[in-house]
Image (cartoon, grey):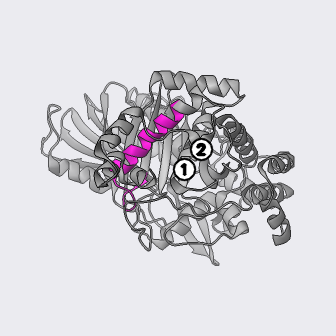
Amino acid sequence: MNRAIAARIAGLGPAQREVLEQRLARATGPAPPLVRADHDPDRGPLPTSAQQRSQWFVHQLDPGDTAFNKTDAVRITGPLDVAALDRALTALVARHEVLRTVYRLVDGEPRQIVRPAPDSVLQVVEWDMVGSGGGPVSREVRRAVVAEASRPFDLASDLMYRAVLHRLGDEDHILTRTTHHVAFDKWSSAIANRELGELYAGFRADRTPALSELPLQYRDYAAWQRTLLSGEGSTAHVDFFAAHLAGAPTVLDLPTDHERPARATHRGGTVAVELPMSLVDAVRSTARDHGATPFMVLLAVYGALLGRYAREEQLLVGIPVAGRGRQELEALIGVFINTVAVRVDLRGDPTFSDLVRRIRRAALGAMAHQDLPFDELVRTLAPQRLADRTPLFQVMFDYINTPEAPFSLDGVDLERMDAGAEGAVHDLTLYVHDHGSSIRTVWEYRADLFDRPTVAALAEGFVTMAAAAVSAPERAVAELPLLAEHQRQRIRRLGSGAGAAQAAGSVVGSIL
């Protein structure tokens, strides 16, 4: 798309843009079939997927960064069969090639090399019965668990799945499983939990585990993706996002507690807030009334909240998508997750109903083009790259309503443990966990930008704004309150000085 066309699109109003994007959203052809790819071992290492290439590139910038590590730690009490556990973990790594794939530079491009299946995966650490009987875990053991979570991967040589078993007593253990995002996503965690449980039960009972053969491996997906991106469908995807993002600011300057560092760090924190049941019911009702989903309604609130804080009429929000729209990918471990950019358009003083309709149209259009890898979009659009910010957007919204597959092992009890320091890749991410009967929000923030009280105030403001929006959806978004009545009364008592700003959270106070 040339600059003249992009400039004309950027000048379109919300209604005109909606017509254009609806037409572009339908302009996609059929995807190529997803089948096993022919691979001649004599031709050398395999091409990577776009997701693998992105992770490899980030790793080269800072090989010691562990922001993309994921560690699950569980305390296991009961008669654990350590030999069966090792066999199960080893079988999982043998079953999914991506867990034993390494990455090396070949002719200027990262390539994936599938290593042979290992003889053993589990590392056992003896602790001289320090936690025997299920009592409190010593600081020394906790430090060891955190250290494992903070140990970086060498993408050129390591297995992408590490397992360490800390033996505290005959029937008292702590198991940590650490993966790297180059080979693992949230969906993969559920697969690994389910398959490990079956593999362990089978080996413990001396029977063949009941797992069907995998029809594909991750390398087949990488080959399919390359074919997809070389066809006309890729052009249609790029055209949609070029139109969708034209004229939107790619930098969101939220007011922060601390000056932005020259290079982003991944120190993070979280604030969790459970939505009141009355609000959950009202969100679902508003979604039905607008032919939308609770995801769209709460994304509209999030966008309106951030627009108010940043004093912006337009902003971009990153939305993660599972990337597993094809049935053949549902049973594979690997990194399929992608991110789409959704425009929040607050121009023209819309009502909340208007905003929900705009969000619905924008989200549906973006989802129709979710096969375009985010890094390919960035490379094509070539936005200004800044070392202290992620490209295109700096805030995320992740709506999670898929049932979790908890990790369980036959014959023992498991209790989840804290695996270490929190991290944050983006300035602000709102995770919405929809459990059906309840909705819990978790606000993840960069600790070098925000203090926890500020994010807590943001989270409370989100609840206040959401309640007002769904109770009167024809009310103008600009009029929706940020503060609950008890906060307003407290601030009135404190006056307009520093105490009032502190009471509301420093960032909230700065815009009152």
> Is there CB contact under 8 Å for labels 1 and 2?
yes
User: Which region shows up in magenta?
Assistant: 445-467
Residue depicted at 63% across the width and 48% down the height? 217
- What amino acid is found at the position of numbered circle 2 in the picture? Ala
| Side of 174 where 39 appears, left or right | right
Q: Between residues 198 and 443, which one lies in front from this camera angle?
A: 443
- Give the residue pinned by disc 2: 478
Residue 330, picture quadrant: top right
| Side of 356 where 23 appears, left or right | right
**Whole-percent x and y of residue 320?**
59, 47
Task: Look at the numbered disc 1 and give the secondary structure of its residue.
Answer: helix
Secondary structure character of the magenta stretch overall: helix
- Give the residue pinned by disc 1: 308
> From the viewer's perspective, is residue 51 above or below residue 22?
below
Q: Between residues 43 and 322, which one lies in front from this camera angle?
A: 322
- What amino acid is found at the position of numbered circle 1 in the picture? Arg
**Whole-percent x and y of residue 148?**
31, 55
Crowd class of label 1 (few under 14; some 14 to 19; many from 20; radius 10 Å): some
Q: Quadrant of the N terminus?
A: bottom right
Pick whichever of labels 1 and 2 is earlier in the sequence. 1
Q: Between residues 273 and 497, which one lies in front from this camera angle?
A: 497
> From the viewer's perspective, is residue 321 above or below residue 113?
above
Q: Is residue 447 magenta?
A: yes
Task: Look at the numbered disc 2 and give the secondary structure of its residue.
Answer: helix
Task: Examine the rendering and report whether any part of residue 22 can be seen.
Answer: yes
Task: Examine the rendering and report whether any part of residue 407 can be seen.
Answer: no
Residue depicted at 79% across the width and 54% down the height? 240
Q: Is residue 346 magenta?
A: no
Crowd class of label 2 (few under 14; some 14 to 19; many from 20; radius 10 Å): some
